[in-house]
Image: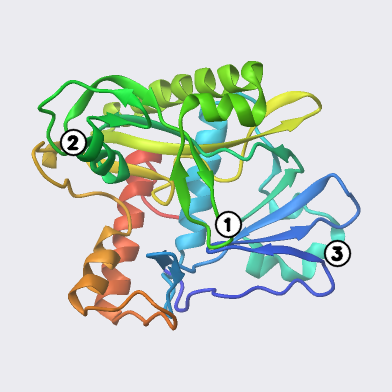
């Protein structure tokens, strides 16, 4: 385990294109068609980056994404060029220690402005939508379902960014068609559900339920390509199968422990975001490590 969390990165004169809640994205040296995706140890909750990070979180997320990119390459191409620091362009070599295990060199994609969400279980915003309307993203569901119930079949419930704060808003499939066109909308739906089915089958074989997840796709050389992170605990809801009990919330391999702590201290969810006690940091890191072990079979980073 690293002693300190990496919260901020600097790669010399390399242009920083975006600093997200977790990832710092740089223009790759020596190529205008490639980007450097660097996953920090920042952690966010309630749309705020917290004052404390989780040591090794960026490495854990990156290793999980790399596992899934390889696992899914027969289903959909992805944007990964290499995650081997020894293969990075020479100007990145002085930063190898910072980059190791948490960085991907990727191809630049023209991203679709749609979050492609697959749900196999009723939880989170889907549960709230169902309680209010009896449907999720306009898709009618049987009456009488409980929180965490498995759905009759997985559904495609897309979302769109609605402001610069990074909130997502559930939208209908018809709105996806309006945004990207019918051909691309159909392809995004098909790929999302196909990936979800394949990933769910693997997760189940490891004693894990993949309740829901979100993907981001873009176009590279005219081909729909899987991009960003994929099937990590930050973009997916993973439940230990042996603890699954429908009818209420289910324990998950994600940052729910952090959210519960923040609720317990009655934080008003306004900036500045608080830091986390050492116990919360340690237990949250272990949650992420549990996910790494369960999904990939790796005991350590």
Q: Earlier in the sequence, mark 3 or mark 2?
A: 3
Q: Nearer the viewer, mark 2 or mark 1?
A: 2
> In the rendered structure, which disc, 3 or 1, sits on the residue that comes first in sequence?
3
Task: Reply above or below: 207 against 21.
Answer: above
First reached walking from the N terminus: tag 2 or tag 1: 1
Quick one: quadrant of the C terminus?
bottom left
Q: CA distance from mark 3 to mark 2?
A: 45 Å
59 or 228: nearer the eye?
Answer: 228
Distance between mark 3 and mark 1 Cα atoms = 18 Å
Q: Give the left or right position of residue 135, taking residue 301 as reference.
A: left
Foreground residue among 187 and 107: 187
Q: Nearer the viewer, residue 197 or 45?
A: 45
Residue at (42, 78) in percent of width and height: 52
Q: Which residue is mark 3?
A: 91
- Secondary structure state at the residue bearing disc 1: loop
Assess disc 3: are there few (<14), some (14-19) or many (≥20) residues with their C-alpha within 10 Å of its C-alpha: some
Q: Position of residue 160 (x, y in %)?
A: 53, 43
Q: Would you name the residue on which mark 1 appears?
A: 101
Residue at point 26%, 34% (across, down): 209
Q: CA distance from mark 2 to mark 1?
A: 29 Å
Given contact means CB atoms under 8 Å apart, are the residues at marks 2 and 1 in contact?
A: no
Residue identified by numbered label 2: 241
């Amino acid at each position: 385990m690293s002693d300190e969390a990496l919260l901020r990165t600097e790669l010399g004169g390399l242009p920083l294109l975006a600093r997200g809640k977790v990832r710092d994205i740089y223009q790759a040296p020596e190529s205008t068609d490639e980007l450097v995706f660097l996953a920090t140890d920042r952690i966010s909750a309630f749309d705020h980056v917290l004052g404390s990070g989780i040591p090794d979180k960026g490495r854990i997320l990156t290793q999980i994404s790399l596992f899934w990119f390889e696992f899914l390459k027969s289903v959909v191409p992805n944007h990964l060029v290499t995650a081997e620091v020894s293969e990075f362009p020479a100007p990145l070599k002085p930063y190898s220690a910072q980059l190791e295990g948490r960085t991907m060199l990727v191809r630049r994609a023209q991203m679709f402005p749609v979050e492609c969400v697959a749900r196999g279980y009723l939880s989170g915003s889907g549960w709230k939508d169902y309680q209010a309307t009896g449907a999720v993203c306009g898709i009618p569901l049987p009456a009488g379902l409980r929180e965490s119930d498995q759905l009759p079949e997985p559904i495609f419930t897309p979302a769109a960014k609605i402001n610069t704060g990074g909130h997502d808003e559930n939208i209908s499939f018809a709105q996806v068609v309006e945004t990207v066109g019918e051909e691309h909308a159909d392809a995004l739906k098909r790929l999302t559900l196909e990936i979800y089915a394949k990933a769910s089958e693997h997760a189940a074989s490891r004693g894990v339920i993949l309740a829901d997840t979100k993907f981001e796709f873009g176009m590279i050389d005219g081909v729909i390509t899987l991009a960003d992170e994929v099937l990590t605990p930050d973009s997916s809801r993973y439940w230990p199968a042996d603890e699954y009990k429908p009818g209420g919330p289910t324990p998950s391999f994600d940052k729910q422990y952090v959210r519960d702590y923040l609720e317990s201290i009655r934080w008003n969810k306004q900036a500045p975001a608080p830091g986390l006690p050492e116990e919360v940091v340690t237990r949250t890191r272990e949650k992420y490590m549990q996910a790494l072990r369960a999904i990939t079979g790796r005991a350590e980073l």
